[in-house]
Amino acid sequence: MTGNSKFHHGDPKGAVQPIIEMKNIEKHFGRVIALAGVSFDVKPGECHCLLGDNGAGKSTFIKTMSGVHQPTAGEIFFEGKPMHFDDPRDAISAGIATVHQHLAMIPLMSVSRNFFMGNEPTRKVAGISFFDKKRADEVTMEEMRKMGINLRGPDQAVGTLSGGERQTVAIARAVHFGAKILILDEPTSALGVRQTSNVLATIDRVRKQGIGVVFISHNVRHALAVGDRFTVLNRGQTLGTAARGEISPEELQDLMAGGQELAQLEGSLGGTV
Amino acid sequence: MSNATQPTAKPDERVKEISAFRNALIRPELGGIVGTVAVFTFFLLFAFDSGMFNSQGIMNWSVVSAQFMIIAVGACLLMIAGEFDLSVGSMIGFAGMMIAIFSVTYGWPVWAAIIVTFVLCTAIGALNGWIVIRTGLPSFIVTLAFLFILRGFTIFLPQVIERKTIIGGILDVAEGDWLAPVFGGTIFKGLFVWLGEAGLIATFERGTKQGQPVVDGIPMLIIWAIALIIFGHVLLTKTKFGNWIFAAGGDAEAARNSGVPVNRVKILMFMFTAFCATVFAVCQVMEFGSAGADRGLLKEFEAIIAVVIGGALLTGGYGSVLGAALGALIFGVVQQGLFFAGVESSLFRVFLGVILLGAVILNTYIRRIITGER
Ligand SMILES: Nc1ncnc2c1ncn2[C@@H]1O[C@H](COP(=O)(O)OP(=O)(O)O)[C@@H](O)[C@H]1O
Ligand SMILES: [Mg+2]
């Protein structure tokens, strides 16, 4: 991990090439314009917070990044090359792991089957490839233990876990598969104090491994606790990106509230609007 | 924040330990196991002397159960994948009729008729699935349409081609065919001759078959049922694809977002259901030597009931092939058992309704236990 140590908190990253760069992304649903030209990028080892009020288009935006939606217009560059994701599988295999706001967990299925959903380990017996349940169970138990969740067993159904525990399973899963980018859509909005600090600690740990984290929130305090850069979305448009230290919590709050005081803030955003 | 990164895995004192009994309850096969034991106990006590448990009797309800099993395996995997196929019964009639038309009317070799029918029917299954995926309509509606479309063709085609609704003479054209015995033959004949000679099973006492066992072997139908059950069970519980089946039915959107190819899984399961229906049809045609326009009536519901008795949830994402097989066994044993016991056969339907209701209520309760919802 020492190789990535230059990516820790607060270092200038201007020179580093972004892992993913989204340029002027638009997304229309029929007559609804959910995104009207959003630009955003993520660099290795940073936590880029995407802030905005409900309905601002945050989820829609990250879904264009994770292959769920195809943008109506705009360009995506992945590691410098133009990229197009047809479906979530494409994005996943490129190294983009997403924990969606409405969790991608299936309550009726066991924790270990959920953990490996779409990514099942296999073992060949007589030329036929079988689901390696033993390995899946072991890895799941180990990862859950690391995250501080004590399972009755790998066969316990996800439906019996609390909201926070499910969130933790989802994050652990995304981290486990060694993504280059980890997108977390409002991971803390349904959590209590302890679980929130657990999730924030996880973000910090993941970032230190050189992974680029996209952290969506409408809670400024949560964002400021871990964020390196902050982008505010409002009604489908970006109001600007600011680096840590360039913006105060009050200013972020005002931006999210609709940018009424935008004129006054432009100076403090340092021309990054 | 440093303390938050430390694993703090202690047993949560607020989560009650789940008792072994409740743990056993959340096996999907439980209902099927209890039902099977109950049904056998009942008939052993009240119908033992009826001939239901001699070699002929056992073969009788085994064959009927195996028929139910063949279509239940397909319906089970499809239901777990979150979809229904109401066209199974019509597909059985249609597949049988196609084989008859190809082989008897057109004079094709029987093996060619069987293979072309399999390809045609699984293609129709794929079409069912494709329409469901593309339109987003409930599979209930789409396959209800195919229930009528396929039945209509099954009545219409023989009428315009042969001017009748039953086509016979299939056994004659199947004579010497290499593929027909795979569906219509019996195996282990030697074993049964030996069992007869050893006095373990009954033999004919008079006539041209004197000395031969009354049951001359295991029908291929039963072999197909066992093979499909093993295949379905292994596919569902032991492979990556099985995980995708559960995921597709548990929450298609979540599965898609995790990279599961949900559309492919669902379409393949529609094809597999059609494949099972065709296996049923070919075995039936080879048994009767004819195809009739009314074959397979109501089979889709019987398959679904067997699957539900076997513990699968109608809403998808949960179930078991072994459970469905036990459901089919209960179905077959009760249907034939009531016949052996001399009970009025209409009462079978009463039984069916009652057990269906009981199974669905039990399953809903089990679902609450698994998901912890109230
Ligand atoms: N599939 C969709 N079809 C139509 N409108 C949508 C769809 N998804 C999102 N929207 C609309 O796009 C806007 C942004 O939604 P969303 O991205 O979920 O906001 P956020 O995550 O910031 O709360 C909302 O007005 C929402 O109604
Ligand atoms: Mg959202």
Image: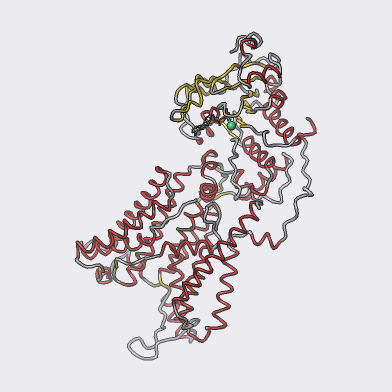
Q: Toward the viewer: B83 or A142?
A: B83
Q: Quadrant of residue A39?
A: top right
Q: Residue at x 58, y 33 (%)?
A: A97
**Residue B76: percent from the left, percent from the top?**
49, 58
Q: Residue at x 57, y 26 (%)?
A: A56
From this view, report whether residue B360 is shown above or below residue A149: below
- Left or right position of A250 against B169: right
Residue B289 in sight from this viewpoint? yes
Residue B182 in sight from this viewpoint? no
**Residue A157: percent from the left, percent from the top?**
64, 50
Q: Quadrant of residue B220?
A: bottom left
- Left or right position of B22 against B349: right
The mark tally for this picture is 0
**Residue A263: percent from the left, percent from the top?**
61, 10
Q: Residue most toward the bottom?
A: B206
- Left or right position of A156 against B79: right
Q: Which residue is drawn at 44% across and 45% down?
A: B264
From this view, report whether residue B3 is shown above or below residue B56: above
Q: Toward the viewer: A264 or B94?
A: A264
Q: Quadrant of residue A46?
A: top right
**Residue B285: percent from the left, percent from the top?**
32, 68
From this view, report whether residue B82 is shown above or below residue B101: above
Q: Residue at x 35, y 86 (%)?
A: B209
Q: How is the image coloured?
A: secondary structure
- Left or right position of B273 against B98: right
From this view, report whether residue B106 is shown above or below residue B345: above
Q: Quadrant of the N terminus of chain B?
A: top right
